[in-house]
Image (cartoon, rainbow, N blue to C red):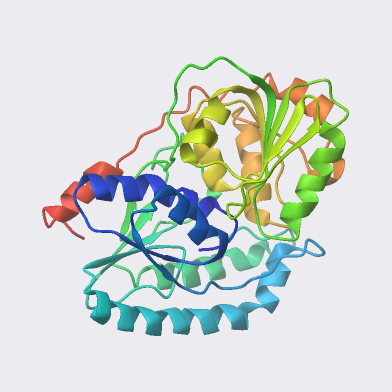
């Protein structure tokens, strides 16, 4: 799914594991999600698969804007189902693994859906609809052979109500957090790393807000703008460097080399932060109820500090973040075991 870079980045460790099992992998995506995966796996065959083209301007709630654009979603749903039928016959595919692409299932082959949000979070005043949307979402997911949940089943989980508010679909496997990053002890070269992500126009607004405040700080700062189609670098001030993109290895090093990280509270980013045992300031995208909920939930668990974008104060946030600690969060990755089970014929 091409909604920011998170859905693509969390597929990186999955693709790596598939390749370790000598499974031939082809990639289908579009936009910056496709570009990221092509950067990470230049040797793999890839195909252009149009996305849902859901726009989010930041004026008004994300839920309302998505509801207005639901016809686009349904058109894309039927379009990608037709595309997959033709693709299976042409490329002789045995299994499809779909990250939040609801139409990419087929009864002729084994189909897997990756999701961390079974229970869609709605704004206050619309909470009464969450049960209804959960049943619709569960119905779509049940059309796949399996749902892979990148979290753990017990109470010490990362997703909170996103996955645990209602009963999970019976075809669900908890595969543990998915991160392309690994933890190593590194010298902290940067005081602050700022990771920009998300759909436009909010991505640009977030960058501009952080840039304005960062220029005034007497700290060594690195900003990664999240634009994989570019390799531009800009020295904003003597201690403030902007780069358009880093591959997984470079960004992993940047995470480990930074005292504090400022980022959106997207779930994939959260998994990366936990994997690298990073201190972080989470700034949810305004109106995106999933990110707003995650930021609040993780702060209540004393894992990460969060602030709202419209009241962002970096100086205050940096001091507060020092008191939060995610190091005790256990990262259990069961994806290798699940792939081995599938290869041995152990399916639902």
Residue name at image x 73 percent, y 58 percent:
124
Measuring from the top left, give residue 253's x and y in whole percent.
52, 28
Instruction: Choose top left, top right, bottom left or bottom right for residue 183.
Output: top left
Measuring from the top left, give residue 237's x and y in whole percent.
82, 30
Q: Residue furthest left?
A: 344
Q: Is residue 20 left or right of residue 138?
A: left
Q: Is residue 277 left or right of residue 65?
A: left
Instruction: Choose top left, top right, bottom left or bottom right for residue 194.
Output: top right
- Say whether residue 325 is visible: yes
- Numbered-mark total: 0
Q: Is residue 166 left or right of residue 245?
A: left
Q: Is residue 186 left or right of residue 176?
A: right
- Say whether residue 286 is visible: no
Q: Nearer the viewer, residue 234 or 259?
A: 234
Residue name at image x 21 percent, y 68 percent:
94
Residue 286, placed above or below residue 78: above
Q: Quadrant of the C terminus?
A: bottom left
Measuring from the top left, give residue 12's x and y in whole percent.
41, 48
Residue 306, placed above or below residue 209: above
Measuring from the top left, give residue 23's x and y in whole percent.
21, 55
């Amino acid at each position: 799914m091409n909604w920011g870079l998170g859905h693509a980045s969390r597929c990186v460790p999955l693709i790596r594991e598939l390749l370790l099992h000598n499974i031939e992998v082809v990639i289908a995506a579009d936009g910056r999600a496709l570009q990221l995966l092509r950067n990470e796996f230049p040797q793999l065959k890839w195909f252009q698969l149009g996305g849902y083209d859901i726009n989010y301007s930041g004026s008004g709630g994300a839920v309302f804007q998505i509801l207005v654009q639901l016809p686009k979603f349904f058109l894309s749903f039927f379009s990608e189902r037709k595309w997959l039928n033709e693709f299976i016959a042409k490329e002789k595919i045995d299994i499809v693994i779909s990250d939040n692409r609801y139409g990419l299932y087929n009864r002729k082959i084994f189909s897997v859906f990756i999701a961390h949000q079974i229970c869609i979070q709605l704004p206050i005043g619309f909470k009464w609809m969450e049960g209804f949307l959960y049943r619709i979402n569960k119905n779509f997911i049940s059309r796949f052979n399996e749902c892979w949940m990148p979290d753990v089943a017990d109470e010490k989980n990362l997703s909170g109500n996103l996955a645990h508010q209602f009963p999970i679909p019976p075809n669900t496997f908890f595969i543990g957090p998915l991160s392309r990053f690994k933890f190593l002890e590194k010298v902290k070269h940067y005081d602050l790393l700022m990771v920009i992500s998300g759909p436009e126009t909010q991505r640009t607004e977030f960058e501009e807000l952080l840039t304005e405040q960062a220029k005034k700080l007497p700290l060594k700062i690195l900003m990664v703008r999240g634009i994989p189609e570019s390799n531009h670098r800009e020295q904003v001030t003597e201690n403030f460097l902007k780069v358009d993109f880093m591959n997984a290895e470079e960004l992993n090093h940047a995470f480990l080399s930074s005292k504090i990280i400022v980022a959106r509270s997207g779930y994939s980013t959260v998994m990366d932060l936990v994997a690298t045992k990073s201190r972080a300031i989470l700034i949810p995208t305004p109106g995106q109820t999933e990110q707003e909920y995650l930021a609040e939930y993780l702060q209540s668990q004393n894992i990460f500090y969060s602030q709202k974008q419209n009241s962002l104060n970096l100086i205050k946030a940096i001091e507060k973040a020092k008191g939060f600690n995610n190091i005790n969060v256990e990262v259990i990755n069961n994806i290798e075991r699940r792939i081995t089970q599938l290869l041995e014929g152990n399916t639902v």
